[in-house]
Amino acid sequence: MESLGRPLRVGFIGAGKMACAILEGMVLSDQIQATNVLVSAPSDKNLLKFKGCGCMVTHSNEAVVEDCKVVFLATKPHVLPGVLKDISDAVTKEHIIISVAAGITLETLEKFLPPETKVLRAMPNLPCVVQVGAVVFARGSCAGNQEAAVLKTLMSGCGLCEETPESYIDIHTGLSGSGVAYVYMFAEALAEGAVKMGMPSDLANKIAAHTLLLFLQGAAKMILETGEHPAKLRNDVCTPGGTTIYACHELEKGALRATVMNAVEAGTKRAQDMGKS
Ligand SMILES: NC(=O)c1ccc[n+]([C@@H]2O[C@H](COP(=O)([O-])OP(=O)(O)OC[C@H]3O[C@@H](n4cnc5c(N)ncnc54)[C@H](OP(=O)(O)O)[C@@H]3O)[C@@H](O)[C@H]2O)c1
């Protein structure tokens, strides 16, 4: 991407897992070259990985703002207010500031930054690293169509990227941000079931992962491509009196659906509470 005929400079404040996932998605999809990315963090622990990918690195958050037009705020939420205070003097109306911190509202971001700052709040998830993430974002009061378009373009390589009302962002956190962990737990449980029935753990884990890879990918495609409700598609694969309906009965007895619904609700409420504090 270019800005005024020069390659666009993109900065990351925070060099952790999420910064890495977004960067990989952007670089793999050719939206940006690593050499035009500047990343800051207090220690070298994670910066070295970014340096290895060809990015520029620094310990100064202000240097990122001074050098880059688009700046992702990718620290943990509790350190973000301090970071916003640090960078506030360097932020201008030309910047596009994108926070990915869970629970930190647009109102809070705008309160800490100079008036008229163009702020966006995005909620990605880790599968962005393999370009199958799901990102939702909302724009602050001074961010317009152009800023939303820049974010969408940069994130296009990360997977699905949708603009939504801000209130959906916490729900997305409970659904998709945390959903990756639910899927790992499901993989673990599938394998443990096979171990219980006598299969060695290594093999069970491999088969569980392949089951998720092939079947979930296929199942997800079916939902997206047919537009059918998942309940209808599940019904279609349950042969009357067959193994699947017997197994599904056990999942119902264990209240799988109610438990997952509770998990999404708990994740959403936790993100809402974090925003309030
Ligand atoms: N992980 C997810 O699945 C996920 C999903 C959605 C949203 N998010 C959001 O993404 C954000 C980052 O999460 P993460 O999982 O990437 O965290 P993480 O791996 O712990 O990384 C946090 C990064 O912030 C850096 N940092 C700490 N204090 C800083 C400061 N004062 N100035 C600049 N950088 C500082 C850390 O530096 P060091 O390298 O020196 O330790 C580290 O590089 C969070 O706000 C989270 O809510 C994460």
Image (cartoon, rainbow, N blue to C red):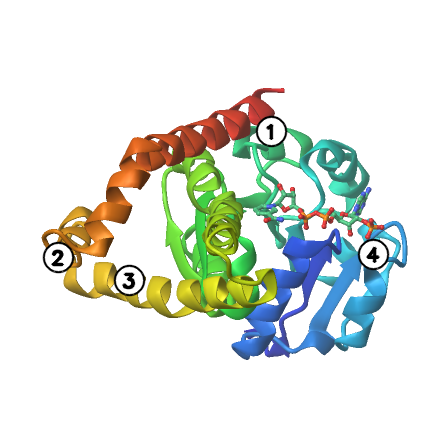
Q: Would residue 104 be visible to someone looking at this image?
A: yes
User: In the figure, residue 275 lies in which quadrant?
Assistant: top right
Mark 3 vs 1, N-terminal side:
1
Mark 2 vs mark 3: in front: 2
Mark 1 vs mark 2: in front: 2
Give amino acid for label 4.
Ala
Instruction: State the residue in front, 231 or 198.
Output: 198
Q: Does 208 sit above or below residue 165? A: below
- Binning the other alpha carbons within 10 Å of mark 2 as few (below 14), some (14 to 19) or many (20 upward) gives few
For the residues labelled 2 and 3, the Cα–Cα distance comes to 17 Å
Give amino acid for label 1.
Thr
Label 1: element kind: helix
Specify the farthest residue to the left.
Answer: 240
Residue under label 4, please give it. Answer: 63
- Binning the other alpha carbons within 10 Å of mark 1 as few (below 14), some (14 to 19) or many (20 upward) gives some
Question: Residue 30, percent across and down?
Answer: 55, 79
Residue under label 1, please give it. Answer: 108
Residue under label 2, please give it. Answer: 239
Give amino acid for label 2.
Thr
Mark 4–mark 1 CB contact (< 8 Å): no
Determine the residue positioned at 67% across, 68% down.
Answer: 9
Residue under label 3, please give it. Answer: 219
- Binning the other alpha carbons within 10 Å of mark 3 as few (below 14), some (14 to 19) or many (20 upward) gives some
Question: Residue 31, percent across and down?
Answer: 54, 75
Mark 2–mark 3 CB contact (< 8 Å): no
For the residues labelled 3 and 4, the Cα–Cα distance comes to 45 Å
Q: Does 170 sit above or below residue 73? A: above
Disc 1, ligand 1: is the CB inside 8 Å?
no
Q: Is residue 238 left or right of residue 37?
A: left
Disc 2, ligand 1: is the CB inside 8 Å?
no
Mark 1 vs 2, N-terminal side:
1
